[in-house]
Amino acid sequence: MISELSELMEMIFPWNTNKNSREEAKRRLQLILAHDRANVNPMMINRMREEILAVVARYVEINKDEMEIALENSDRMTALIANLPIVKFKRVAGAEENSQPLPADINLDLT
Amino acid sequence: MSRIIVVTSGKGGVGKTTVTSNLGAALAQVGCTVALIDADFGLRNLDLLLGLEERVVYTALDVLAGECRLAQALVKDKRLKGLVLLPAAQNRNKESVQPEQMKKITSALTKGYDYILIDSPAGIEMGFRNAIAAATESVIVTTPEVAAVRDADRVIGLLEAEGIHNIRLIINRVRPEMVQTNKMMSVEDVLELLAVPLVGVVPDDEKVIVATNKGEPLVIAEDYSLPALSFTNIARRLQGEKVPFLDLMAEQNNILTRIRRIFGG
Ligand SMILES: Nc1ncnc2c1ncn2[C@@H]1O[C@H](COP(=O)(O)OP(=O)(O)OP(=O)(O)O)[C@@H](O)[C@H]1O
Ligand SMILES: [Mg+2]
């Protein structure tokens, strides 16, 4: 009786229900289908993340905390989306002073 | 040219046989000739849903073994002109049939029928391979549940890999009151995930079970029901008619919005 009543209340005021299993099902499926379609599992995604990071890190510095690698679906197409924020180039304080001064006795003669 | 449609799902128990029998009956009712093939060898039950079990004499396997002619194995539905069933064998295993043999039988049936609907077994193994072998189109049956949608997606991928690109979706057992309270995915949710065209929505309705008790397709029942209308609409859409989808939420909403208004929601 109580449960029937609360069910009726949920039907009348759906916005009061915070346990939204419909969204949860959809969210889980989005991930599951992306992995199924690409035939990869979460472990492979992790390994891929490490390897991509290693390659990119040879050229630029990546912000590891904010990087994202995920599979995304749209219209039966699956894409691997990588977002690798590059660490802002930080000018080290006093860089000018630390740079090696030119030796005074260099020879720039072209002839 | 006849159309060869396999009804499949991946996951078991989502309503393939229910769809095959009722859609077959609905197509016959709108004037098409229809042959239903039970490809669920070893676990046949299409004959039961159609109420034809007493009249099964031969099966597809007897035809393949040369023990009877194809015409002898076809069971005619006396209530619906143009509807016949080719039963599956009950006692032999699925491995005894080959995709090539299914193709042979199906192509023979194309000479006499507008539609050939093939009821696939669950799974993606040999029985499924046999069921899809001859098909040029597919109707995928799913329910708005995580496991069913996932398996439907797998099967869609397999069909596409086999060159079957004409794929349409039936979402079965929808419960509008659960969608309303965010306890079940909506038709739109499932469509967004699977991204194949919709051909029908069938409500979860006890009349479906009552019809199977009687062995009577919904469309010929005396009191015409909402699920019966769903199947008639699917038949008409397959025929190329543009039929708007039933708004299962409408009834629900009518009452609820009125109550909400009282509460100022
Ligand atoms: N729309 C519906 N409303 C209520 N009950 C339904 C509905 N559709 C199917 N059912 C019930 O669900 C059960 C499974 O249906 P059915 O046998 O058609 O599924 P199936 O996909 O063919 O199963 P299998 O994979 O075992 O072949 C049956 O008891 C059936 O009556
Ligand atoms: Mg079945």
Image: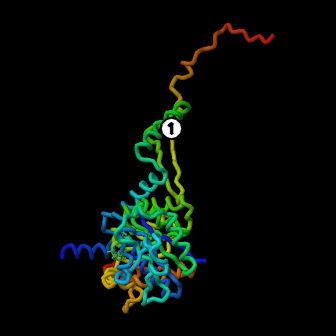
Q: Image check: B214 left or right of A48?
A: left
**Residue picked out by circle 1:** A52
Q: Image check: B239 left or right of B38?
A: right
**Residue occupying the point 44% across, 56% down:** A33
Mark 1 secondary-structure assignment: helix
**Residue occupying the point 54% across, 60% down:** B162
Q: Is residue A41 above or below residue B17?
A: above
Does mark 1 have its CB less than 8 Å from ligand 1? Answer: no
Where is residue A12 drawn, in percent x and y? 31, 76
Furthest residue in direction front, as rendered = B67
Circle 1: residue type: Ile
Could you say which quadrant of the image residue B79 lies in? bottom left
Q: Is residue B193 visible?
A: no
Could you say which quadrant of the image residue B67 lies in? bottom left
**Residue occupying the point 58% across, 78% down:** B111
Where is residue B25 drawn, in percent x and y? 45, 83
